[in-house]
Amino acid sequence: MSDDAFGARMVAQMPYLRAFAISLSGSYSLADDLVQETLVKAWSHADSFQPGTNFRAWLVTILRNTYFSDYRKRSREVQDSDNVLAEQIPVKGGQEAKATMADVQNALNELPPEQREILLMIGITELSYEEAAQICNVPIGTVKSRLNRARAKLAEHLGLTTLNDIDSDPTVSDLATRMPGRVV
C-alpha cells in the first residue's frame, strides 16, 4: 500500500477514532490529542499493518493501548501547574547541590585553619561556644571573633553579600542557620 493510500485510509477513520477517544477520555481536547498520537504511531508503524485485516480495528487497538498507557502514566503524575508542590521540594536538583557544595568546600579551604575549625565545630557539629572554647583551649570571645571572621570570609568567597543571598541557597543556608548570631 502506498503512503498516499495509507494516509487516506487513516484520514477516513478519524471521525470514528475521535468518537471512540471522546468516549474513553470524556474530554474533547484529550480525545484530539489521543487521535493525533494514534495516527503518529500508526504512521510510524505502518509496516506492521497486515493488509486484508480490519484497518479500523488496528487503529482502534493502537488508540486504546495509547489511552491506557497514558492513563496509567497520568495516574502516577500530580497536576502542579502553579508550582505549589514543586516549590515545597526541599532539595534542588542533584547537579546544583553538588556544584554548590563544591563551592562551599573550596571556600572553606580558603579560610585560615583556626577559623575553619571554629566554623565547622559550631556550624556542622553544632557545638556550643563554650564547648568549642574548651576544645580549642581559647576564651569564648576568641571563638566568637573567629566565627564572625570565618562567616564573613566564607560569604566573601561565595559572593554572598546579603542575608537573602544565604537564605536563598539551601546548601549554604543549612550551614548558616546552625550558626548562632550570624552576621553577613
Image: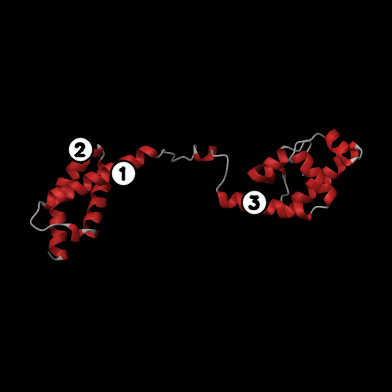
Which residue extends farthest left? 52
Residue type, numbered disc 2:
Ser
Indicate the quadrant containing the N terminus: top left, top right, bottom left or bottom right. Answer: bottom left
The image's mark for residue 23 is 2
Dividing the picture into quarters, in which one does residue 127 lie?
top right
- What's the residue type where badge 1 is placed? Asp
SS under mark 2: helix
Image side of residue 29 versus residue 110, left or right: left
In the image, 175: left or right of 140?
left
Residue 108 x, y percent position in the rendering: 75, 51
Q: Secondary structure at mark 3?
A: helix
Classify residue 141 as left or right of residue 102. Answer: right
Q: Residue at x 12, y 62 (%)?
A: 5
Residue 12, placed above or below residue 86: below
Left or right? Give the position of 118 relative to 18.
right
Identify residue for label 3. 100
